[in-house]
Amino acid sequence: MKLIIGFGNPGNEYNFTRHNFGFLALDFYAKIKRLEWQKNPKFDAIYLKSGDNIFIKPQTFYNNIGKSVQAFSHFYKIPPEDCLILCDDFNLDFGTIRFREKGSAGGNNGLKSTISELGTNEFPRLRLGTGNEKLRNKIGDYDFVLSKFTPEEKEKLPEILREISEKLGELIS
């Protein structure tokens, strides 16, 4: 069994923000696979099951996302190496998709929380590039991760989300 976690913040005001790229990717995957999300207040997440996979969108807000990851992984006895994280990364160019078997948080507060809660950094992650140096330098890191994608970026999202879905399918099969 695998646990696939999309990182993001709950609430409509965060839709199509850079920090919600993980949620967006899982929503796209669920849509093309015709899967339906369910609420699970016990674990503070929205989830769905498909075969031997559990997909979750934690509702704890980004900086505390590890609490939900830990609750699901503990309850279902899923080891960290079978937890796959999908998170944004502003250090990667927009549209870049990078897979890592393990690694540091690299400044990502959601990964810091998850590493803290799981007690290890040895879990795979799919880092989704949101980088836009010009905008980031103009508004700063905090406002950048909570900013919406630009119109030019939104135009490219369907193609990028298809790529992410294909990669996700390969990783969980």
Image (tube, rainbow, N blue to C red):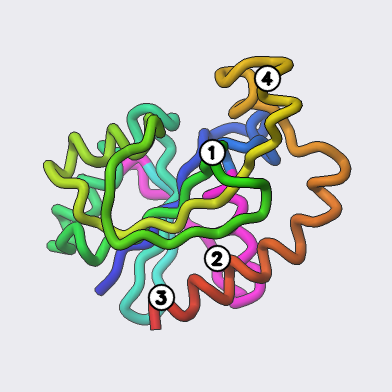
Pointer 4 and pointer 2: residues touching (CB < 8 Å)? no
Q: SS for tag 3?
A: helix
The three-letter amino acid code for the residue at tag 3 is Leu
Quarter occupied by residue 91:
top right
Q: Is residue 168 visible?
A: yes
Q: Is residue 32 above or below residue 64?
A: below
Q: Is residue 109 above or below residue 3?
A: above
Give how far across and how far down residue 53 sits, in percent: 35, 72
- Residue 99 is covered by the magenta coloring: no
Which comes sooner in the sequence, label 3 or label 1? 1
Q: Residue at x 53, y 34 (%)?
A: 10
Residue hosting label 2: 36
Residue range (magenta): 21-44
Which comes sooner in the sequence, label 4 or label 3? 4
Q: Distance of mark 2 from mark 1, alpha carbons?
A: 32 Å
Which comes sooner in the sequence, label 4 or label 2? 2
Q: Distance of mark 4 from mark 1, alpha carbons?
A: 12 Å
What label does residue 91 carry, if any?
Answer: 1
> Disc 4 or disc 3, which is closer to the eye?
4
Q: Distance of mark 3 from mark 1, alpha carbons?
A: 23 Å
Pointer 4 and pointer 3: residues touching (CB < 8 Å)? no
